[in-house]
Amino acid sequence: MKATGIVVEYNPLHNGHVYHAQQARETSKADVVIAVMSGNFLQRGEPAFVDKWARTKMALQSGVDLVFELPYRFATAHAPIFARGAITLLDAVGCSSFCFGSEDGDITPFTNSLSLINQTETVYETVIKKAIQDGRSYPNALKEAYTSIQDNTSQTQLADLTKPNNILGFHYMEAAQCIGSMMKPTTIQRRGADYHEADLHAHKVASATGIRKSYFSTGSMDEMEPFVPQATKDILFDWQAERGHFGNWETFYPYLRYTILREGPIRLASIADITEGIENAIYRAALKHDAFQPFMAQVKSKRYTWTRIQRMLTHILTGFTVEQRETMPAPSYLRLLGMTGDGQTYLRSVKKHLTLPLISKVATLSNDSLTMDIRAADLYAMALGNCQHVPKIGLDYLTPPIRTHHFGSNDSK
Amino acid sequence: MKATGIVVEYNPLHNGHVYHAQQARETSKADVVIAVMSGNFLQRGEPAFVDKWARTKMALQSGVDLVFELPYRFATAHAPIFARGAITLLDAVGCSSFCFGSEDGDITPFTNSLSLINQTETVYETVIKKAIQDGRSYPNALKEAYTSIQDNTSQTQLADLTKPNNILGFHYMEAAQCIGSMMKPTTIQRRGADYHEADLHAHKVASATGIRKSYFSTGSMDEMEPFVPQATKDILFDWQAERGHFGNWETFYPYLRYTILREGPIRLASIADITEGIENAIYRAALKHDAFQPFMAQVKSKRYTWTRIQRMLTHILTGFTVEQRETMPAPSYLRLLGMTGDGQTYLRSVKKHLTLPLISKVATLSNDSLTMDIRAADLYAMALGNCQHVPKIGLDYLTPPIRTHHFGSNDSK
C-alpha cells in the first residue's frame, strides 16, 4: 500500500482542507492519506478552537486515513522546527511522498530555492545572523537573507518566501533533505479566501483564521456554514453543546494571567522562548490588564512578532521550560490519534517497518515529550473552563484512537 | 500612650473576638489595641473567607485600633514561626503587653511550662527529633516531648498543650522570650462554641470555623447572624453582593489543580513545606479528582496532618519556594492595613521609636517578603474568580490604610 503525508492543524477543518486531502491522494495515487496534526496548542502559539480529538474526527470524515499527533515541542515551535518534527513523523510512518499547499501549486521554484540556499549556505546564514543581531525578527531576517542570495543568481524561478504557506512548504523540503528522507515533495495550489468560488465546484473556501474570527465576533456558527463540510459543522455543534465555548486566548487569559503573576519575572525567564528580559514586560502587562487584547497590545513591540509572543505565552501556560525543550531534539514516537479502516489496514502492513514506536495507548510509553503532550491537553481542558458532563483531565488516557470511515465507506470494502 | 497587642485571623470576626479585644484593653489598661493579622492565606493553610481589607474593616469596628499584616511567610507557617513573626511585630510597634485567648485564662501554667522547657531543653528537643524521625507529625512530636518532661517534674500547674489555643499562646510566650521582648504576656479565657451564652450578656459565641461551615453548608448567612457583630454582617453582605462568593479551597481548587498539573512532581518538590516525595501523591490526586474534598482524602495519610498538607497547597497556589522562604528569616516591615483615630494618634507618638520601617504605601519599599504578600493577595483575588465591578489585581497598591472609628467614636474625641 502507498501512503502520502500532509501536515495539518485543522483549526477548524474547512473546505480548503478537504480539497488538499483529495488532491494529495489523487496526485500521488496513494492508497492512504496520513496527517500529522498539532495537538491542543498550535504553531502560531494559540490554544486550538477545539481539542485534538474533535479535530481528528473532522479529519477522518474529510479524506484523511490516519492522524498522528505532532508533539507539543514541535507543534508550538517556529517553522523550521515545526517542519522538522512533522516531516520526521511522515517519514517514520512510511510515506512515499508528502504534499503541501502553496500559492502557485508548482514544486519547481521550491526545488530551485532549496538548491540555491544549499549553494550559498554560508552567505545565507551570515545574513540571518547579522539581521537578528541588528534586532530584526526571525521571519524578517529570513526574508533579508533570501533576498540577498536571490540578488546574486540568474535563476528566475524561485519560491516566494514572503507567503506563510510557501515558507512552511520550503521548510518541509529542507527538513526532508536534512533527515535524508526519500519522500517525494509535492505541492498543490492553496485554495484560500482569495480564490474564486466557482473553481471549487460551488464550495466556498475561507481561511481557518477567518472562520474563527467570524465565530468569535458573531458568537454564532451561521456565518461559517458555507465554508466547512457537514462533518465539521456536526462536530462543532456537539462541542458547543458539551463545552459551551471554543478555545482562544481571551477564554484562556485568566489562567495565563494567574500563572504569570504566580511565577513572577525571575521564574518566567526559565520558560522556553522567553529571552532578553521580555519576562518583565509580560509580568507588568499581566499586572495591569484583565483582558487578553490590551495585555498583548502592551507586550507587543517591534522586536517580536505577535506569533513569537504568543508562543511564549503558550509555554508559560503549559510550564514548558528551556531545560525541558533541550531533552526533545527529535520526535521519538508515533502517537496515533485516529484511523479509518484503510488507515488501519495500512498500519498493519507497515507495522514492522516503522522507524519510531507506534503509540495507541499513552500508558504504554514513559517519555518526557509524551508527558508534555498529555499535560498540554490537560491544561487546555482546565483553562477552557467548566464542562460538567465531560471529563477534563486525563483524556489522553481515556481516549483510544478514534476509529471511523470516511465518505461513507465501510470496514469490509 | 499605652498599647497592648493581639494576634488574630478574624476569619470572620465574631462575638468571641470582640470580647477578646475588649478584655485585652481592659486587663492591660491600654489606650490602644494593636492587632497583627494574617493576610489572605491563613495559618491552617486556607484561603481566607474574605480578604485582608474586609477583615481589617471588621477589626476596626470591633475594638481594634491598629491592624498590621503578618507577612505571608509567617502567616502560613506552623505555630512556632507564626508566633515568632507576630510577636516580633507587636514588639516592634511598641506594645507593652500582649494578650492571647486560652482555655483557662490563667497565665501561670504557661509561665511554668515555659520555664520547665527551658530547664529541660536538651531532653525536650531530643524527644521531638526522635518522634519526627519515627514518623510522628510535628504536633504529635511536641505533645510527646511535653509529656516526657512533665513526667519528670513535681510542678503541677502546667499548661495543657493539647489545645490549639494553648499551643499558640505558649509559642507567643516562647517567641517573646526568644527575641528578648519586654512585653508582658497576658491571657483571657477563650469564649468558644462550648461556652455558655448567658455569660456573654446574651451574645452567642461560635467558632469562626463553625461560622464558615454553616455558611458553606447552607449557602446563607442567616445561621451565623447571632454569632457575629453587626459590622461583620454588613461587611460580609457587601462582599457577597460584590464578589458573589467567599473564599475556601473548594472555590480555589480549579486554580490549585491547574497549577499542580502544570508544575508536575519535579517542580512541585521545590515548593516550601513539600518533602519526602509527597509531591507525587499530590500530583496523582490532582490528576484524578475534580473537587477538593476527594483530592484531599487521597493525599491525606497518617504521616501528615490535614493542616500541614493545606499549607503545602497554599504554597503551591502562590508559588512560594523553599528558596524564597530562606530569604525571610524575620519580619522586616510593619505593614499598616488600617487604623482608628486613636490608632493614628498612637502611631504618631511612637513613630520615631519603631524598630521596623512602617509601610503605609507598599510602593515605598522594595522587599521580597512584601512582594510575596502582594502576590498572595493578587492570586487570592484571581482564584476567587470573576467579579466585574471590583479591581482584582494590585489592590495592595490601590488600597490606602483603612481609616475608621470604632464604637461610634469620632476623630475629635
Image (tube, coloured by chain):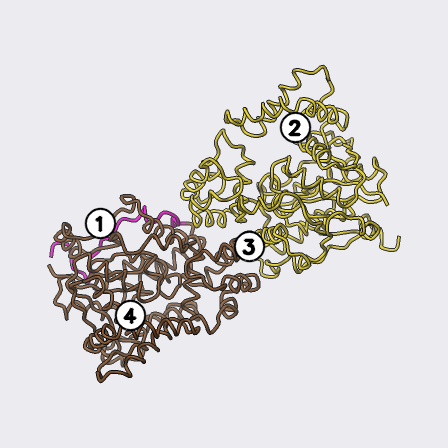
Chain colours: A yellow, B brown
- Tell me the element at label 4: helix
| Residue A294 % position (x, y) | 46, 38
Tell me the residue that label 3 is attached to: A382
Give coordinates of residue A240: x percent, y percent: 63, 52
Element type at marker 2? loop
Q: Is mark 1 on a helix, strand or loop?
A: loop
Subunit ID for the residue under disc 3: A
Is residue A188 located in the magenta-colored stretch of the structure?
Answer: no
The amino acid type, in three-letter code, at marker 2 is: Lys
Task: Give the mark nearer the N terminus: 4 vs 1.
Answer: 4
- The kind of residue tagged 3 is Met
Instruction: Name the mark on residue B168.
Output: 4
Q: Residues within 10 Å of mark 4 (few under 14, many from 20)?
A: many
Residue density around tag 3, few if under 14, some if 14–19, many if 20 or more, within 10 Å: many
The Cα atoms of the two marked residues, 1 and 2, are separated by 60 Å
Residue that label 1 marks: B357
Q: Reply above or below: A137 against B188.
A: above
Q: Nearer the viewer, mark 4 or mark 2?
A: 4
A105 relative to B386 in the view: left or right: right
Q: Are marks 4 and 2 in contact (CB under 8 Å)?
A: no
**Are tags 4 and 2 found on a single chain?**
no
Pointer 4 indicates a residue of which chain? B
Picture coordinates of residue B24, whole percent (x, y) = 18, 68
At mark 3, the secondary structure is helix
In the image, the segment drawn in magenta is: B389-413
